């Protein structure tokens, strides 16, 4: 299950393996608890580098950087005492990534110490070397698409596609392209390659089981690629950004299913069959002047009402004043945090 989740889950940033829970009401308890949390000769021999991440707080330990440093100190002190040498700290590509979380439990302040199965955040799929000015994280885009319910049977349009992330995640989901597989050709499936995850170097790693999961994920993608999809179209006015999107689609191995065109997202000709429009237009936090954006939203609303009857619009908004300029009433509002900005994923039924 742990292997399969790393390959196929589209939404998490991290997947963690629990090492220990222990009471933690002081620096001394944290230090001692870490040293007793695992068989460190097995899990962190001095030949392995490591990085410590921390989250949460308890009284006396309310700074994540300090808490992470205390975990590091406990580990290297234990190694010096028991092994006469210590591991290096590697912030970029460590052999082990440890995660500490501090919080209140039923028995008082508690610490949870885990190993992360990946060195980097799982939202980094590997296809997006090129990004627009304000890109969505891949896993956030995947979550937004999940809410739309798009299954590939009706057209999917993005009038402001930017780096193409919404469309890539939508098509990847329907075609069962496991995020943990390396983008690109999957045939033959038994030659498929996956990302290099930290858990592959753990002492109890099972290479044959991992390989079986990689092949199974690739076979599912090869099989799903045989199904026809309704048109998937993105428009982008900026030629440079459009080229970035095309590079991303190609790197994801989805060029056969995603059509990208240079053009004004306010002047669209929809396919005959009604479908879904998704978009993440500027909302003033990073890009665009407020007055110009109000006109953009107004024109978008006018176009949709005139040409897209029977369609559904899903729009990511971080500015309620701008969405009011659409002149439409949302039938659903999903709270979203996008890079710390309080947003709403809004659904509109276009009549």
Image (tube, grey):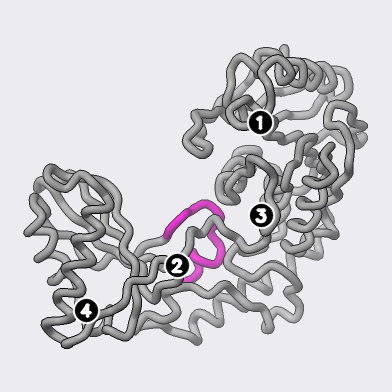
On whether residue 277 falls in the magenta region, the answer is: no
Name the residue: 53% across, 59% down. 9
Q: Earlier in the sequence, mark 3 or mark 1?
A: 3
Q: Residue at x 66, y 73 (%)?
A: 218
Q: How many marks?
A: 4
Spot occupied by residue 94 in the image (x, y as percentages of width and height): 40, 73
Q: Give the CA distance from mark 3 to mark 2.
A: 29 Å
Residues at marks 1 and 4 touching, judged by CB atoms closer than 8 Å? no
Residue 4 percent location from the top left of the image? 50, 68
Disc 3 to disc 4, C-alpha distance: 39 Å
For the C terminus, the image quarter is: top right
**Image mark for residue 92:** 2
**Is the residue marked by circle 3 packed among few (<14), some (14-19), or many (20+) residues within 10 Å?**
many
In this picture, which residue range is highlighted in magenta? Answer: 1-14
Q: Is residue 228 above or below residue 303?
A: below
* Residue 99 % position (x, y): 31, 60
Give the structural element (helix, strand or loop) at label 1.
loop
Q: Is residue 130 left or right of residue 255?
A: left
**37 versus 316 height, above or below:** below
The answer to whether 154 is drawn above or below residue 322 in the figure is below
Q: Which residue is mark 3?
A: 173
Q: Which residue corresponds to mark 4?
A: 40
Q: Report the side of 120 relative to 299 (left or right).
A: left
Contact check, label 2 and label 4, Cβ < 8 Å: no
Q: Secondary structure at mark 4?
A: helix
Q: Nearer the viewer, mark 3 or mark 4?
A: 4
Q: Which comes before the other along the chain, label 1 or label 4? A: 4
Answer with left or right where residue 327 lies relative to residue 34: right
Q: Determine which of the numbered discs, if any, sits on residue 299 in the image.
A: none
Q: Which mark is residue 287?
A: 1
Residue at 70% x, 79% y is: 189
């Amino acid at each position: 299950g742990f292997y399969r989740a790393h390959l196929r889950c589209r939404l998490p940033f991290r997947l963690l393996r629990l090492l220990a829970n222990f009471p933690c009401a002081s620096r001394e308890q944290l230090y001692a608890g870490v040293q007793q949390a695992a068989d460190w000769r097995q899990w962190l021999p001095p030949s392995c580098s490591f990085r410590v991440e921390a989250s949460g707080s308890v009284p006396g330990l309310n700074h994540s950087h300090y808490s992470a440093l205390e975990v590091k100190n406990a580990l290297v002190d234990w190694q010096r005492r028991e092994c006469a040498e210590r591991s290096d700290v590697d912030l970029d590509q460590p052999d082990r990534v440890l995660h500490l979380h501090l919080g209140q439990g039923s028995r008082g302040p508690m610490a949870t110490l885990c190993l992360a199965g990946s060195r980097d955040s799982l939202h980094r799929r590997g296809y997006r070397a090129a990004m627009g000015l304000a890109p969505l994280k891949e896993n956030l885009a995947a979550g937004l698409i999940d809410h739309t319910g798009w299954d590939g049977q009706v057209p999917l349009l993005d009038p402001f596609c930017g780096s193409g992330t919404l469309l890539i995640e939508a098509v990847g989901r329907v075609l069962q392209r496991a995020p943990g597989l390396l983008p690109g050709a999957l045939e033959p499936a038994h030659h498929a390659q996956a990302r290099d995850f930290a858990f592959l170097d753990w002492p109890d790693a099972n290479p044959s089981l991992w390989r079986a999961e990689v092949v199974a994920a690739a076979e599912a993608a090869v099989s799903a690629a045989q199904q026809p999809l309704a048109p998937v179209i993105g428009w982008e006015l900026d030629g440079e950004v459009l080229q970035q999107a095309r590079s991303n689609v190609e790197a994801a191995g989805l060029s056969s299913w995603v059509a990208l065109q240079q053009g004004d997202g306010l002047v669209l000709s929809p396919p005959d069959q009604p479908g879904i429009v998704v978009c993440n237009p500027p909302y003033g936090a990073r890009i665009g002047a407020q007055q110009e954006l109000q006109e953009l939203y107004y024109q978008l609303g006018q176009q949709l009402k005139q040409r897209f009857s029977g369609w559904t619009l899903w729009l990511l908004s971080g500015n309620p004043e701008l969405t009011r300029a659409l002149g439409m009433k949302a039938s659903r509002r999903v709270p979203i945090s996008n890079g710390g900005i309080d947003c709403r994923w809004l659904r509109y039924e276009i009549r």
